[in-house]
Amino acid sequence: MSCHGSSGVGTFLLLLWQITGDARYLDHARKAAVAVLEDAPRSYHGACHGLSANGHLLLDLAQALGEDAYARQAEDLATGLAVRSARRAGRHLFGNPLGRRATFGHADGIAGALGFLLRLRHGGPRPSRPSRRRRRRAPSPAAVSRSPHA
């Protein structure tokens, strides 16, 4: 999930809508998508709260709602990533938020941008999304006391 900013808030609201079905949360998640698009010209590449995180929010919305317009907007953000990169030995490199050097971590480095670009190209869930599988319930105290290992 994104750290903070519109993409983080929008991701949280989308998950809340998926869990509760309350349309207010979806409405606000859509508004967060508008905000990330408006902020795109001033954003850096990061997966914490930059273009990569913003793109993940748009891909999440596209998957959850089946609306291709969000996926196309994510493609536009990928173009913004390419514009902000430096080419070294035929490869795109992204500087840290201050633009001084390339970094390799997930939050503000190449790994985060690469995670977004790979998801954009190949689909699938967000790399940092926790599983929504149901967890097994802990056994009741009565069941534990009947266990031969208790």
Image (spheres, helix red, strand yellow):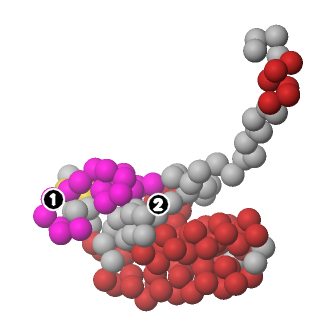
How many other residues sit within 10 Å of disc 1, few (<14), some (14-19) or many (≥20)? Answer: few
The dominant secondary structure in magenta is loop
- State the SS at label 2: helix
Highlighted range, magenta: 97-115
> Which residue position is annotated with label 2?
116
Residue at 62% of width from left, 55% of height from top?
124
Residue at 23% of width from left, 54% of height from top?
103
Residue 142, by quadrant, is top right
Residue at 15% of width from left, 59% of height from top?
101
How many other residues sit within 10 Å of disc 2, few (<14), some (14-19) or many (≥20)? Answer: many
Q: Is residue 52 visible?
A: no
12 or 95: nearer the viewer: 12
- State the SS at label 1: loop
Number of numbered discs present? Answer: 2
> Which residue position is annotated with label 1?
101
Residue 11, by quadrant, is bottom right
Asked if residue 39 is positioned above or below residue 128 in the image, the reply reads below
